[in-house]
Amino acid sequence: MPDLPHRMEARRYVVMGAGEVGRYLAQTLSLEGHSVTLIDVDEGKRVVAEEQLEVAFVHGNGSQLPALEAAGVAGCDLFVAASSSDEANLAASLLAKRVGAQRTVVRVSTAEDITEHGRIYEETFSADLMLSTQLLTTTRIVNMVLGYNTIDIEYLAQGRLQVRKTHVDPGSILQRQKLADVKLPGNGLVLAFISNERLLVPTGDDRARPGDDALIFAPAESIDELERHISGHATHIGTVVIAGGGSTAREVAKRLAPHVSQLKIIEHNRKRAEELAADHPGYQVIHGDVTDPSILVEEGIGGASYFVALTGHDETNLMACLLAQEHGARRIIALVDRSDTSTLWRKVGLLDVVSPRMVAAAQITEYIDNGFQRSIMSIEGGTARFVQRSVFPESPAAGATLAEISVPRGLIVAAILRDGIATVPRGNDQLVAGDDVILFVHQSELSTVHLVFPGPDRI
Amino acid sequence: MKITDILVRDALVLDLASAEKSAVLAELAGALAAAEPGLDAEALLQVLSEREKLQSTGIGDGVAIPHGKLPGLPRLIASFARSRAGVDFESIDGQATHLFFLLVVPEHAGGQHLKALARISRFLRDAEFRKLLEEAETPEDVLRAIEDEDAKF
């Protein structure tokens, strides 16, 4: 693929927080020839920034004006708030926009901030993109275990609905059969096939071409089943052992549990282990030390399909992984915080290493490479996008059935939000005043949206 | 559904006198009411204005499709009007509006309403069709352009 023009011109970036994510991102962008300034409250980071990363450094609080002004936020192409404090990052985004940053990206730590409240935070704090390292990490690990090809996820209707961009494998049913013959499970929709050259809003006669990505849509509780159905990797997964019971482990467990025959979590903190067991009767929670060989052997690590190390400590993860390897776990995945140690992991044969800062940085550089467009919310430079509108009594759509509305190809009523419940509708469902709808619209049909669903955009 | 079948020919206006949005809506409603016995211009204007408050029906490219549901109306009706000077209709692309298709439907027209809207907006996406309407010298020119477009789909 040829380099896009916007990658060739030098841009100006300001990154707040010289932690792992900030440093890695600053280095990546600087190596591409852009001007980068790092802001950090710790003067001690200056040496690393200026001498190792060769980027400019401003000592100060990125959620206060003096530091933002000193870093030249006014007019910068992108401001990235990646400090370890969610609050500081959100405040910094708002201020940076006021000072004149063209766009902002905000990193937050926990998943719910994005899945449930992302839209509100984005609006309130003027963030163009919010990302959670925890959520991105979870997606990567789930991809590895379940054989999914999720590229990106967007959360709609306070997390009740999900859109995923996923790569279509050659074995996938979406390539083998035309859409009309594919029986999609659990209320799901295939909204589009996407390749480098085109976006296709499919009809029943279409199928994915080799190399295509697909945009899939379903309620949160059934989207994994949908992705599994189309992934072409419906192999049975036996026991998965997770080391550590922290918040990332919980997120991973929640996603994996319905698809594996047994899920075991080993947690050394007794209180946390008890809480986990009480909250999730379906998990087998073991209180113990993951670096204790007898525990791993007792829990049948040799027969496990996957061992996933998520303790939050690199050293503990490394030790546990080596033991799991020694005792015959089939596949081993580890979360590694310090990106500079990844070579070491590979040397001892642990290849499936996930680094939170690398996935976060990758997400941000993808956003940049995509011309500062979110790959799902605005597809292929805006050829199609999601719109949420309300149905008013005066709306032409009020009282109409889905079949009547979906006349033009390129306008899909993907979901109806009614009385707090999100459903993916079928042709004979009827819209009533008071409903909200989530529409997937090709740009050629935007004027139809204005006519049929008049009113302000809710997304 | 053919647009020709629902178009009220006697309500056609080639040169709107009004230059401002609310006055244009009133002129459109008045012209249609004058041609359709039993149609209340005031009630129609009310409905159209309510709809515009939600979001302008000016869909860009110099086109607006004001529309609304009118209780008691026996059937779907449409009319055409043109402003040579152009009107600030608060259209989504911010450009002046020259071509107006007015669509009025019975209260429970449901699918018919949407079909007519979709058909009119589809016609108007065609730059050549818009040009024919913009350059029409007589009402017959307008009718012919619409008939020809109707025959295509």
Image (cartoon, coloured by chain):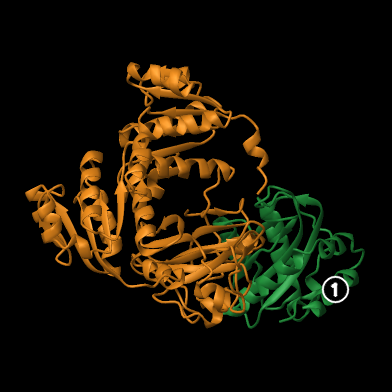
Chain colours: A orange, B green
Residue at image coords 35%, 54%: A141
Measuring from the top left, give residue A336's x and y in whole percent.
31, 42
**Which chain letter goes with mark 1?**
B
* Residue type, label 1: Leu
Left or right: where B142 falls relative to B108: right
Pointer 1 residue:
B143
> Is A327 in front, or is A31?
A327
In this rendering, does residue B105 appear at all?
A: no
Q: Nearer the viewer, residue B131 or A66?
A: A66
Residue A168, above or below A119 = below
Whether B8 is drawn above or below A358: the answer is below
Q: Secondary structure at mark 1?
A: helix
Res B39 → quadrant: bottom right
Q: Position of residue A361 (x, y in %)?
A: 44, 40
Residue A403: where, in percent of width, then height?
55, 79
Position of the N terminus of chain B, as image quadrant, is bottom right
User: What is the quadrant of the C terminus of chain B in the image?
Assistant: bottom right
